[in-house]
Each structure stands twice: as C-alpha cells, then as structure tokens.
Image (cartoon, rainbow, N blue to C red):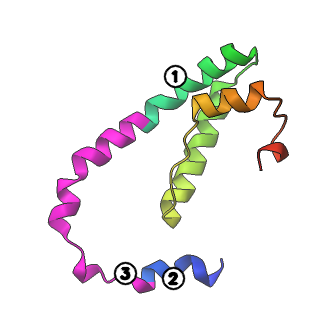
Amino acid sequence: FNEDLWIIWKVVNFSTISWAAVFKSIPTMVALTAFSLIHVPINIPAFAISTNADADMNAELIAHGYSNFIVGVVGGLQNYMAYTQSILYAKSGGQGKASSL
C-alpha cells in the first residue's frame, strides 16, 4: 500500500479522543448501519423497474458489502446508491462505467 494511506494512524492521537462522545454516538451509528443495510434491497429493484433492466440482487449485495468493508477499513465514506441520480444518469443516456467518470 501507499504510505499516505496509513498516515491517519500516525496523525491521530488516541488519548485525545472523547470516548464519551464516541459511545454517545453509538445509537446514530447503529441507525446508519441499519439504513445502509436496507437501502440496497429497496433502491436496486426500484431502479431496475424504472429502467427496464435486470438486477442481480446477490451480485449487488456482495458488491456493496465488499466496497463498504474496504472503505471502512481505510476510513472512507460508505457506498450508497442514490436512486434519483442514477435515474437521471440512465435517462440522460449514460452508458457503462466509463461515462460516469
């Protein structure tokens, strides 16, 4: 890995963390986790119906699981399928992964 990826673990001084605040935020973290778990089974079929596409829910759930695990390990933001943006992209002629860059 690139050394820059791990710099956060050198910069953060764990003795200065307010662990009371961390524990106080646990209910919010649990709610966000629950929301993350239910958004894929809701948004992917809705997107498939809206665009007349087939969706493989197993593949989608596995892909979201892997991507969220990886970014969680390195301190990134979770993967989230924004339904309205995806519909706008599809209806405006977006085709394939490269056109989304």
Q: Does the magenta stretch include residue 18?
A: yes
Query: Which disc is residue 63 wearing?
Result: none
The reply to whether the C-beta atoms of the residues labelled 3 and 2 are less than 8 Å apart is no
Vertical order, 54 against 18 (above or below):
above
- Image-quadrant location for residue 99: top right
Name the kind of residue labelled 2 in the image: Ile
Question: In x, y percent, where is residue 8?
Answer: 46, 78
Q: Is mark 1 on a helix, strand or loop?
A: helix
Rendered image: mark on residue 7: 2
Q: Which amino acid does label 3 sit on?
A: Val
Q: Where does the N terminus fall, quadrant-wise? A: bottom right
Question: Which numbered dot is residue 42?
Answer: 1
Q: Horizontally, is 54 left or right of 42 in the view?
A: right
The answer to whether residue 49 is above or below residue 81 is above
Query: What residue sits 81% from the left and 34% below the top?
Result: 94
**Does 44 lie within the magenta span?**
no
> Looking at the picture, how far across and down is residue 43, in whole percent?
56, 25
10 Å neighbourhood of mark 2: few (<14), some, or many (≥20)? few
Q: Quadrant of residue 33?
A: top left
- For the point 73% across and 33% down, which residue is it? 89
Count neighbours of disc 3 (C-alpha within 10 A) and say few if under 14, some if 14 to 19, many if 20 or more.
few
Which residue lies at the image location 57% right of the left edge and 35% below the top edge?
A: 82
At 24% from the left edge and 51% from the top edge, which residue is drawn?
26
**Which secondary structure class fits the magenta region best?**
helix
Q: Which one is in front, 49 or 6?
A: 49
Q: Earlier in the sequence, mark 2 or mark 1?
A: 2
Residue of label 3: 12
Magenta region, residue range: 10-35
Please identify the quarter of the rendering in which residue 23 is found.
bottom left
Give the mark nearest the N terminus, 3 or 1. Answer: 3
Q: Which amino acid does the dot numbered 1 rest on? A: Ile
Callout 3 touching callout 1 (CB < 8 Å): no
